[in-house]
Amino acid sequence: MTTRPANIPDLIPHYIDGERVESVSGETFEVLEPVGNTVYTRAASGDKTDIDRAVAAAARAFEDGPWPRMKNRERARVLNRIADIVESRDQELAAMESFDSGLPITQAKGQAQRAAENFRFFADLIVAQRDDAYKVPGMQMNYVNRKPKGVAGLITPWNTPFMLESWKLGPALASGCTVVLKPAEFTPLSASLWAGIFEEAELPRGVFNLVNGFGETAGDALVKHEDVPLISFTGESSTGQLIFRNAADHLKGLSMELGGKSPAVVFADADLDAALDSTLFGVFSLNGERCTASSRILVERSIYDEFVERYAARAKAVIVGDPSDPATEVGALVHPEHYDKVMSYVEIGKQEGRLVAGGGRPEGFGEEGNFVAPTVFADVRPDARIFQEEIFGPVVAITPFDTEEEALELANNTKYGLAAYIWTRDVQRAHLFTQNVNAGMVWLNSHNVRDLRSPFGGVKASGLGQEGGYRSLDFYSDQQAVHITLGDVKTKRFGASAC
Ligand code: NAD
């Protein structure tokens, strides 16, 4: 039995216009923990009526409230207070996140720091914000009048939920938008902390609203709401496609962070120890439920056998266990539905590749809980489903290559294009490969380490638009162009013959 955090509410409510409220319909849904798959609480299940109320509150706060009109320094003060409070709650947050999502406690512990950083970073950015002004000497001055767009709809997934919510909340609030957040239905617990955090930080009433519920009901109503001009969505590519269609009627601004099947390309001249550490961490950290997971490893033939052998030995030694145990490296997958999906890919993989580690439940585990042994398939062909499709669990496909051209072809041979990891000591090759690989983000001789100033986003089926740094502020802002004539107005005088 895993450790149950204190203070779990009997019902996780919505948060609308500064109040914790139930759904108008009274509907609720069950929330499971992934170690025993027991129902440990219920959450209010929102639908269109609840979304309408939340959007109305956010619209009022945008039209009449102080938030969009505050000086940037004032907003930054609130954001910094939010960051401090988030950090001060790191133990509570980590315990909740680990309990609700199955994330190992040691990995959950970093989430509050990262979430706090998302607020601090955008607080700094808006204080240093500058916008363009252009002069046409003697004729015209032009400047950019940046304005928050309005009510932002934020729709988030269940992997590292609190941190990913902060990633959207930080820039949306910094820009002066008001928001309606629809967190993932698998993991509503940690999102319930936001209301208290924002109240303590004195964010004005109505600026932050949260509606729990399913994607097809609450999420859908938010996407289709005419008073929500923009949607920032993180989730599966197929959901992104649906949202894209549903947002078309109101021509909404869309930012989409979607799925991935990112390659790690290991050349023979790489630092093999470092590449092993990084590619193991890349797919088994966060239980493999990581959008940028290096879930395909392409290895140069001359080191292939050694790499596979060492990789498999390490994967077999990864400690799977109770998420609340500090020794655990891979915990329990978020939900039985997701567990079934990952397990079905493990079975598919057995037909498609050579199983060299894992392949089912870890040894010594009974039937209870969503535990999957770190699973490694070697000799996986590029047309295999486990090479092409996002599994989003602790499952990896390894494929050999002979030449740089072949490595590039394999790397680009999926519909996704989120991240790529290149391992080589040849600097020229590293940069040339990077130029040609279809990935929104590339790490050279590194695992995924973010710099919040740099762009984040995928290409192809992995995303639409890029966030990160000023790009995020641009998404949540309108940049109005203002033109002022200097000196005489020089207009062609239509109809001038009449006078
Ligand atoms: P999902 O697409 O099933 O759900 C994501 C969110 O969308 C949830 O809140 C869900 O309720 C909502 N939703 C579902 N259908 C909807 C609809 N019709 N209208 C509006 N909202 C709807 O994704 P998931 O299973 O929660 O998350 C895993 C996926 O997220 C993976 O594909 C992963 O790669 C991706 N992801 C991407 C990034 C990134 O930055 N690129 C980061 C994390 C996760």
Image (cartoon, rainbow, N blue to C red):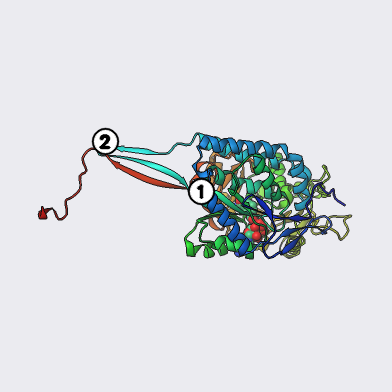
Which residue corresponds to mark 1? 64
Q: Who is closer to the viewer here, 414 or 215?
A: 215
Viewer-closest of 74 and 117: 74
Type of amino acid under label 2? Pro
Helix, strand or loop at mark 1: helix
Residue 390 in sight from this viewpoint: no
For image coordinates 65% across by 56% down, the residue present is: 211
What's under tag 1, amino acid-wise? Asp
Residue 167 locus on image (x, y percent)? 61, 46
Answer above or below: position of 451 versus 406.
Answer: above
Q: Which of the two residues, 62 or 182, is positioned nearer the viewer here?
A: 62
User: Mark 1–mark 2 contact, CB under 8 Å?
Assistant: no
| Residue occupied by mark 2 | 137
The CA span between labels 1 and 2 is: 39 Å
Residue 230 coordinates in the image, percent (x, y): 52, 55
**In the image, residue 489 lies at what x, y percent?**
22, 43
Q: Is mark 2 within 8 Å of ligand 1?
A: no
Q: Is residue 188 left or right of residue 441?
A: right
For residue 266, side relative to residue 357 (left or right) = left
